[in-house]
């Protein structure tokens, strides 16, 4: 899916989501009275830092989750991804809907993605393009997920799916790396009570009071906020589209050109 305007240059996404400023946890070892008296902006305690270091690993251990990504990247224009992610294999699927504020109809795509590949279905003109090129019919187009293009930028869609796949880790982080985090308060996220923390780069993270799993992450990309909400954590099994039902755009750049992908 293409954005009406390309993002301005972004810093390259780094291997761990912790570097993106994403991880947090609940107050650890504080009673109700102490928590009630705590001032937003207070530094995290050593106990909290220990819990913070486990959050991405806990997401992986949970198996997966449903997710919603909301990115209002232009005035009146919002890209929303709604789907589920298998953290164990870093594979997801979603419906991507771009809603415009200028009267244009919504643009909808069916997505599957891994850390390396992005599949798009419901692409207008795909059947005609394949037929015109003498290629067999297919439901999906596939291309590599890229962190940045020749211009030094990545498409917004690539950035968002990478953010989702990086909401887990194979091991815990070093608690010492969370010394700059602060407590921001508590709030309800999809009906679940959560504690909110902020990283040194400004991202905010909400963690469920009972589950102690990541339930929401908000960060700024350029001049707009991206909000990722996770729910219903648990095992997921998401098969990627079959090769026979997919056209590889890297092998057929003429199809990518025809479709504007």
Image (spheres, rainbow, N blue to C red):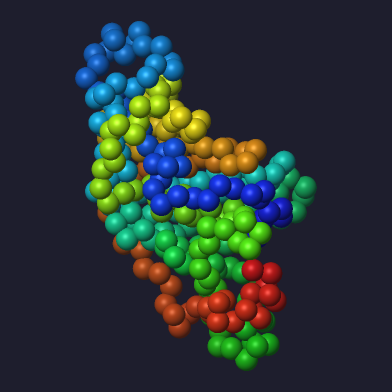
From the viewer's side, name the closer residue of 104 and 229: 229
192 is higher (above) or lower (below) than 135? above
Check the image and name the residue furthest to the left.
29
Q: Give coordinates of residue 14: x percent, y percent.
A: 45, 50
199 is higher (above) or lower (below) than 129? above
Q: Quadrant of the N terminus?
A: bottom right
Residue 73 located left or right of residue 90: right
Q: Quadrant of the C terminus?
A: bottom right
From the viewer's side, name the closer residue of 39 and 141: 39
Can see residue 127? no
The mark total stands at: 0
Residue at 65%, 44% (x, y): give it: 73
Residue 213 located left or right of residue 229: left
Residue at 55%, 88% (x, y): give it: 136
Q: Give coordinates of residue 217: x percent, y percent.
A: 45, 37
Q: Give coordinates of residue 205: x percent, y percent.
A: 42, 33
Q: Give coordinates of residue 242: x percent, y percent.
A: 42, 77
Residue at 62%, 55% (x, y): give it: 153
Among the 4 quarters of the image, the one containing residue 224: top right
Residue at 64%, 49% (x, y): give it: 9
From the viewer's side, name the closer residue of 192 and 115: 115
106 is higher (above) or lower (below) than 200? below
Can see residue 200? yes
Check the image and name the residue furthest to the right.
102
Residue 25 located left or right of residue 242: left
């Amino acid at each position: 899916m293409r954005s009406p305007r390309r993002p301005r240059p972004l810093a390259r996404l780094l291997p761990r989501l912790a570097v993106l400023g994403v991880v947090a946890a609940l107050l650890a070892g504080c009673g109700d009275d102490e928590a009630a008296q705590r001032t937003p902006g207070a530094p995290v305690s050593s106990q909290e830092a220990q819990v913070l270091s486990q959050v991405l690993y806990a997401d992986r251990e949970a198996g997966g989750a449903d997710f919603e990504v909301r990115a209002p990247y232009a005035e009146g224009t919002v890209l929303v991804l709604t789907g589920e992610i298998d953290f164990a294999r870093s594979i997801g699927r979603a419906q991507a809907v771009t809603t415009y504020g200028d009267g244009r109809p919504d643009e909808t795509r069916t997505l599957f993605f891994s850390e390396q590949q992005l599949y798009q279905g419901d692409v207008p003109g795909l059947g005609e393009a394949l037929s015109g090129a003498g290629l067999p019919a297919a439901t999906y187009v596939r291309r590599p997920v890229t962190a940045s293009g020749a211009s030094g930028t990545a498409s917004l869609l690539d950035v968002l799916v990478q953010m989702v796949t990086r909401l887990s880790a194979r091991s815990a982080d070093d608690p010492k790396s969370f010394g700059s985090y602060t407590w921001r308060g508590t709030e309800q996220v999809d009906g679940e009570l959560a504690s909110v923390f902020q990283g040194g780069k400004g991202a905010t993270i909400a963690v469920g009071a009972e589950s102690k799993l990541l339930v929401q992450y908000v960060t700024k990309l350029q001049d707009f906020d991206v909000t990722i909400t996770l729910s219903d954590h648990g095992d997921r099994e998401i098969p990627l589209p079959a090769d026979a039902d997919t056209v590889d755009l890297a092998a057929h750049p003429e199809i990518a050109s025809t479709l504007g992908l």
